[in-house]
């Protein structure tokens, strides 16, 4: 059973400036909860008990969010707001969460490399800290774990994207093994639509065997002069079986303004406190526009 996860949260967030100048993109709220908390909750719901977060300059707010806040707790006790007190205390109790600083912003592959000694030569999950993946049944990370437990090889979450958008993603080259499971023969980082072997894009969730670290050490900086995780996967798949899973669920990209607004509306409509009021307001607003 996989118990450890790595959550890289060290990027600049340039697609969402100016707010990310001083606010980590992973701390941008969806309704009233930062994105990275949803990511941690997904990991915990999948059975993860030990999490290493890779953070960079200007990301201390992430560390503080998952730590205790005695002054806030005292204030809530004085106000007899015990429901919120329980909610706040629960954030720091979700899992054993550790932090390490990425000294330079050298890409996702470099960030994952920092976890080598933390995972202790065990298979582990990687969940990108700025991406929500909502599942319809089991958490997406748990779905990947199920594939890993069956085939004992690294597994990557996949989603179908429009062919004209493949240049934004890493994509799989491979064939169907069974159902939604693919066997990878290659991984291509941000191919042109003409050169893309498929429109199945890597979707921010991974299960790796510890051998990935050996391939990361052999990987030179690539696109944007950064160590690309996909480039290490490209080396790894030549030596051992790797898999992809078209997961049951939906990925939400909050790294741009439109994606952020859409995601807030979708999550807001499902919120017990504001969902119905938001629904009624949206109907009224749409009628006024029409």
Image (cartoon, rainbow, N blue to C red):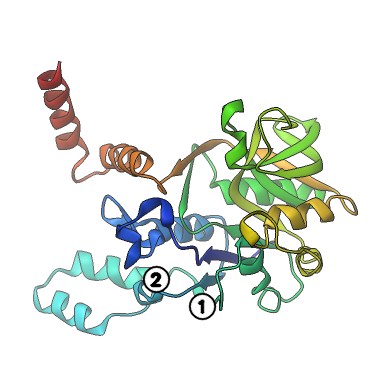
- The residue drawn where x is 26% and y is 42% is 268
Residue 159 can be seen in this image: no
Q: Earlier in the sequence, mark 2 or mark 1?
A: 2
Seen as rendered, the residue at the extreme front is 225
- The residue drawn where x is 22% and y is 78% is 73
- The residue drawn where x is 17% and y is 82% is 74
Identify residue for label 2. Answer: 62
Point out residue 289 in the picture as x, y percentages from the top left corner: 14, 21
Depth order, front residue of 28/79: 28
Determine which quarter of the picture holds residue 90. Answer: bottom left
Depth order, front residue of 158/216: 216
Point out residue 84 in the picture as x, y percentages from the top left corner: 21, 65
Q: Is residue 122 left or right of residue 107?
A: right
Q: Is residue 210 above or below residue 239?
A: below
Q: Are marks 2 and 1 in contact (CB under 8 Å)?
A: yes
Identify residue for label 1. Answer: 99
């Amino acid at each position: 059973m996989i118990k450890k996860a790595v959550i890289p949260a060290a990027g600049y967030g340039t697609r969402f400036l100016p707010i990310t100048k001083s606010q980590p993109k992973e701390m941008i709220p969806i309704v009233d909860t930062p994105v990275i908390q949803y990511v941690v909750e997904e990991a915990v719901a999948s059975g993860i008990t030990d999490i290493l977060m890779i953070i960079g300059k200007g990301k201390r707010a992430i560390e503080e969010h998952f730590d205790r806040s005695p002054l806030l707790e005292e204030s809530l006790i004085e106000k007899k707001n015990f429901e919120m007190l329980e909610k706040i205390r629960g954030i720091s109790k979700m899992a054993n969460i550790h932090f390490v600083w990425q000294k330079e912003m050298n890409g996702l592959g470099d960030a994952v490399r920092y976890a080598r000694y933390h995972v202790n030569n065990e298979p582990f999950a990687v969940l990108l800290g700025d991406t929500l993946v909502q599942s319809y049944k089991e958490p997406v990370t748990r779905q990947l774990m199920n594939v890993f437990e069956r085939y004992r090889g690294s597994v990557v979450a996949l989603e179908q994207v429009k062919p004209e958008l493949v240049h934004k993603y890493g994509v799989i080259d491979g064939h169907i093994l069974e159902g939604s499971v693919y066997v990878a023969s290659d991984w291509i980082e941000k191919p042109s639509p003409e050169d893309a072997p498929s429109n199945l894009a890597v979707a921010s969730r991974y299960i790796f065997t510890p051998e990935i670290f050996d391939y990361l050490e052999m990987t030179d900086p690539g696109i944007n002069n950064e160590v690309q995780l996909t480039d290490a996967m490209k080396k790894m798949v030549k030596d051992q079986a790797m898999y992809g899973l078209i997961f049951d669920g939906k990925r939400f990209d909050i790294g741009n303004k439109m994606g952020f607004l859409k995601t807030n509306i979708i999550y807001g409509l499902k919120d017990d406190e504001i969902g119905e009021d938001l629904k009624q307001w949206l109907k009224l607003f749409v009628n006024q526009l029409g």
